[in-house]
Image: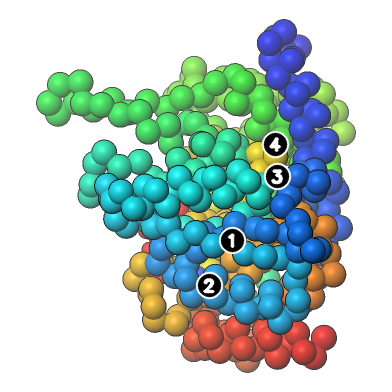
Amino acid sequence: MLSHTSQKSAQTLLRGASRCIRPAMTTRGYAEHARPLDKTTTFGGKTTVTLIPGDGIGAEVSESVKEVFKAVNAPIQWEQVDVSGMEIGDKHMEDLFRESIASVKRNKVALKGILHTPVERSGHQSFNVALRQELDIFASLTSIKNLPGIETRHKNVDFCIIRENTEGEYSGLEHQSVNGVVESLKIITREKSERIAKFAFAFALANNRKKITCIHKANIMKLADGLFRNTFKKMAENYPTLECNDMIVDNASMQCVSKPQQFDVMVMPNLYGGILSNIGAGLVGGPGVVPGCNMGNEIALFEPGCRHVGLDIKGKDQANPTALLLSAVMMLRHLGHHAHADLIERAVLGVIAEGKTRTRDVGGDATTQQFTRAILDKVEQL
Ligand SMILES: NC(=O)C1=CN([C@@H]2O[C@H](COP(=O)(O)OP(=O)(O)OC[C@H]3O[C@@H](n4cnc5c(N)ncnc54)[C@H](O)[C@@H]3O)[C@@H](O)[C@H]2O)C=CC1
Ligand SMILES: O=C(O)CCC(=O)C(=O)O
Ligand SMILES: [Mg+2]
């Protein structure tokens, strides 16, 4: 049984989850999450969505999404905020960051690229992480699925990574107690472990998934990951129809690259999600093809599932826009625009399956613009 206070928050969450998650009705079986649609900003049949292109390849792949949305007449009005994580300490950027948060809070739905966080500077919190914490978009979802046409070592890969998005190793609490000794705090709370476990089970049921694996390192972090794992196990008692197991993160990484078909839904603390979503992306074609989203009780923010900035190819017209396009497809489904979502998805997957026009990351030589053009042509044919 859950404690009294936890029961209360679990009940709140239950209400949130039941309205937050609707069954998938998708051609690819992507999760469809939803928040009450009446809270979106909709005028004249168009829903206003915050667009944060981000750094690196963000501008180019966002351009691709905008072109495709225009071609299919998707009922979306973009509210674009060009915030960047590159300019540390810049007052204008801090203002834009606040503006992006205000915009997402207002619109409740966003599409986002990735903001860069320089490794070498201290005293600068990642805008990506700050955004997730401030908006309390606590559940990160990455869909790892083979795309027909992209040759991979493993076939029939289809699993979802659900990652706690607001605490754990990303708490940003570090200090040097004495010179040469750094303490970095990982925060795991029962409340947030319960809400992510609850989310994962509700998600699995709503999306006709059969099995949930909790990933942890409770053999070493007995208190922190022990709490995460025990909370998951308690929650599992409420879901007798779902098969549950747990796995240490080291083994899970090995299992992922050797027998990925054993996984269906995986739930885990923050950093393990970052690592496993990257391993997962490697299984199915790389960061350019994996979509994702971040869900809160009211806000949904869609962004590429393994969150790469791509500074090295910025402005070179080489980026694969598929990850952002498929994230945008998830967003359209979230908003109930199924016909537009299906059309874009069929066009994107159709071009990939044909294999004539492919970006370099998946073995071709097409530019971002050529790949986008091929999708637009495909839309015309469908
Ligand atoms: N460095 C940062 O500022 C941030 C890093 N991260 C995380 O750190 C990890 C590694 O990040 P980085 O080293 O910055 O990786 P990165 O952004 O340099 O990406 C790695 C490689 O994948 C390629 N790539 C990524 N997306 C692509 C696309 N759509 N099309 C074609 N090629 C693409 C890049 O060009 C690059 O060669 C990731 O897991 C990411 O989630 C997350 C947010 C910010
Ligand atoms: O924002 C960052 O700099 C890193 C965040 C990260 O690793 C992630 O979003 O997966
Ligand atoms: Mg990461």
Find out whether the residues at labels 1 and 4 contact each other: C-beta distance under 8 Å. Answer: no
Q: Amino acid at mark 2?
A: Val
Q: Which residue is mark 1?
A: 79
Q: Residue at x 25, y 26 (%)?
A: 175
Amino acid type indicated by mark 4: Asn
Which residue sits at x=27%, y=47%? 89
- For marks 1 and 4, give the one nearer the viewer: 1
Q: Is mark 4 within 8 Å of ligand 2?
A: no
Q: Looking at the picture, how far across and down is residue 335, in whole percent? A: 77, 56
Corner quadrant of residue 55: bottom left
Amino acid under disc 1: Glu
Precedes in sequence: disc 4 or disc 2: 2
Q: Which residue is mark 2?
A: 61
Check contact, mark 2 vs mark 3: CB within 8 A. no
As displayed, is residue 95 above or below residue 240? below
* Marks 4 and 2 in Cβ contact (< 8 Å): no
Mark 1 or mark 2, which has the lower sequence index?
Answer: 2
Q: Looking at the image, is mark 1 or mark 2 nearer the viewer?
A: 1
Q: What residue lies at 46% left-to-right and 24% top-to-bottom?
A: 187
Few, some or many C-alpha atoms within 10 Å of disc 3 (few <14, some 14-19, many ≥20)?
A: many
> Depth check: 368 or 54 in front?
54
Disc 2 secondary structure class: helix
Q: Secondary structure at mark 4?
A: loop
Q: Which residue is mark 3?
A: 265
Mark 1 burial class by Cα count in 10 Å: few <14, some 14-19, many 20+: some
- Between the C-alphas of marks 1 and 4, the distance is 22 Å
